[in-house]
Image (spheres, grey):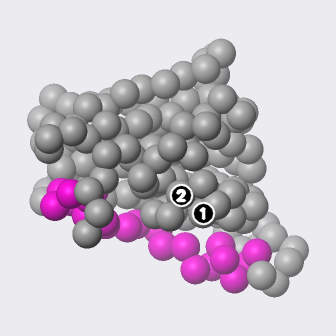
Amino acid sequence: MKKINTVSIISDTHGIVDSHIVSYLKNSDVIIHAGDICSTKIISDLNRYCDQVYVVAGNNDVPEKYFEHKDKKIISGLKKTQTIEINNQIISIEHGDRFGHKADHNGLRQSYPNSKLIIYGHTHIQVCDQDKEPWVVNPGACGHTRNNDGGPCFIQIEIKDNKWDIITYCFN
């Protein structure tokens, strides 16, 4: 299995990935999207940028919002949660809408106790909670919708010698 060095985490694109973020995505070993994609073109683009792409459905990713049968099928195939392994560490991904607009980090930690990292979206607010394991992160909104007076945001994880460094990005 190939050693992963760079993981890019995005969420809440709502149909748009900000142009500032695309070059980072293209230089990633893994891309994770934590839901509210709102466009199957984004999924296609992510798969062109990187060989390992993981996408979960958000509360706005429902087949009824799509007109084309192929788009409905793609969105219908998305899981609400996903657990993956990167460099022998478990990462759990969900959109987080089950918690409303205030994510419950303790609830997430209880749901995924064996993870190193839990990723969620939904709130459009960038969060990096490394107070205890599992770590809990929200990359913020990667698109242009409800960016809470900030610009498009995302998170990258740089992994070197089994040390994970979380780097937050926000563009205005």
In terms of depth relative to the viewer, which is nearer, 100 or 38?
Answer: 38
Residue at image location 39% in from the left, 46% down from the top:
7
**Which of the image's four quarters has the N terminus?**
bottom left
> Marks 1 and 2: CB-CB under 8 Å?
yes
Identify the residue under disc 2: 50
In this rendering, the answer to whether 59 lies above or below 147 is below
Identify the residue under disc 1: 47
Identify the element where label 1 is drawn: helix
Cα distance in 3D space between marks 1 and 2: 5 Å
- Whether residue 4 sits left or right of residue 64 in the image: it is left
- Whether residue 62 sits left or right of residue 70 in the image: it is left
Could you say where residue 50 lies in the image, as x and y percent from the top left?
53, 57
* Image quarter of residue 161: top left
Could you say where residue 159 lies in the image, as x and y percent from the top left?
25, 41
In terms of depth relative to the viewer, which is nearer, 96 or 6?
Answer: 6
Number of numbered discs present? 2
Could you say where residue 166 lies in the image, as x and y percent from the top left?
31, 32
**Which of the image's four quarters has the C terminus?**
top right
- Whether residue 126 sits left or right of residue 167 in the image: it is right
Residue at image location 55% in from the left, 73% down from the top:
78
Mark 1 burial class by Cα count in 10 Å: few <14, some 14-19, many 20+: some
Residue numbers of the magenta segment: 71-91
Name the kind of residue labelled 2 in the image.
Cys
